[in-house]
Image (tube, grey):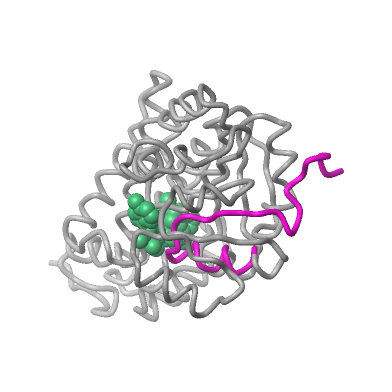
Amino acid sequence: MAANNALTPPARIGLVGLGLMGVPMARNLLAAGYSLTVYDVNTQVLSDFAAANPAASAAASLRALAGVCDAVITMLPNGKIVRDVVLEGADNLASGLAAGTLVIDMSSSSPVGTRELGELLAARGLALIDAPVSGGVRRAVDATLAIMIGGDDAQIARCEPLLKAMGRDLFRTGGLGTAHAMKALNNYVSAAGFAAAAEAVLAGTRFGLDPATVVSVLNASTGKNNSTELKFPQQVLTRKFAAGFSLGLMVKDLRTALEVAQATGMKAPIAQATVDEWAGAEALLGPGADHTAMVKFVEHLAGSTIEDGPIQGD
Ligand code: NAD
């Protein structure tokens, strides 16, 4: 059952960060009937969104947005930028938010920074929950994102209707920061699976197998994962490399996952190897490349591509 002070339409919602994910999420909030105000540091992106979505208001500053919202969603590249936007930049949200306003960080931020930010906001009478997402641009468009949610139970109950306008599977993960930790750990497992599949497909091809056969057999067998099921058929074998999630953001998430493990004092050699592998791909291809293009790094290390076919041994 929804909380008494639940954020149901037409509650006034702010969304900061109109990127690949923020734009479809904002559209879904409008479609659900929320009164939406948006902001992005990129003025072109902001005016394009306002032109295409006349029901939304574009704010001239973060402070201006904060003054007209009951809750604010951040969908930004990383936790450092979230902290600047919320609290520390010359123009920030906290300077304009009324006491009791809820900030919902849906970015993939570092959980350690999230806990610090939560304490700083609480001292000002502001609440923070972490609600990162999984499912990529396609599920953002369809409003079927998986959303992990950490923080105070009463605040989470308030924003459930709002989150359901953007996502389908909502998971409460525990206290503040647990959702950001969960998100990073998910992307670590996803990236490790992708990298393993990239090596397997290339090795199989070099050995004489057809790459489509390798992917098909993995998908009918125990080697199947999300990458072999979706990313290899759609993005890698077609060489489109356009899944809509950048390599730079993936490397950031992998470093966060390693930090989570290290913060608990455990060794995580597979996570370390995964960070090293993906950071190598970022150095070769640049942070703006699509993350699925990391296959090109595996090919670069091997000196042949999946398309080259068999390599004759001595
Ligand atoms: P993006 O780079 O496409 O968009 C980020 C937006 O934030 C840009 O429009 C940028 O101009 C804006 N921005 C940057 N600094 C700002 C500031 N100081 N003030 C206001 N706006 C600012 O990124 P994205 O792919 O939409 O990802 C956003 C977040 O969601 C990231 O944390 C990412 O890791 C996470 N995420 C992305 C995906 C995906 O498939 N793309 C999936 C799940 C989670």
Identify whether 115 is placed above or below 137: above
- Residue 54, quarter of the rendered image: bottom right
Question: 225 or 200, which lies in front?
Answer: 225
Q: Residue at x 17, y 68 (%)?
A: 313
Marks counted in the figure total: 0
Q: Residue furthest left?
A: 314
Q: Position of residue 132 (x, y in %)?
A: 54, 47
Is residue 173 visible from the viewing direction of this image? yes
Question: 289 or 131, which lies in front?
Answer: 131
In this picture, residue 277 sits left or right of residue 258: left
- Quadrant into which the N terminus falls: top right
Magenta stretch, residue numbers: 1-29
Q: Residue furthest right?
A: 1
Q: Magenta segment: does it hold 22?
A: yes
Identify whether 98 is placed above or below 139: above
- Residue 247, quarter of the rendered image: bottom left
Q: Residue at x 53, y 48 (%)?
A: 106
Q: Position of residue 188 (x, y in %)?
A: 43, 45
In this picture, residue 294 sits left or right of residue 52: left
- Quadrant into which the C terminus falls: bottom left
Identify whether 182 is placed above or below 234: above
Is residue 200 visible from the viewing direction of this image? no
Q: Position of residue 101 (x, y in %)?
A: 61, 38
Q: Position of residue 30 (x, y in %)?
A: 65, 67
Identify whether 102 is placed above or below 47: above
In this picture, residue 141 sits left or right of residue 81: right
Q: Residue at x 45, y 38 (%)?
A: 95
User: For ligand 1, which image quadrant applies?
Assistant: bottom left
Question: 127 or 307, which lies in front?
Answer: 127
Q: Magenta segment: does it hold 96?
A: no
Q: Residue furthest top?
A: 265
Q: Residue at x 55, y 32 (%)?
A: 178
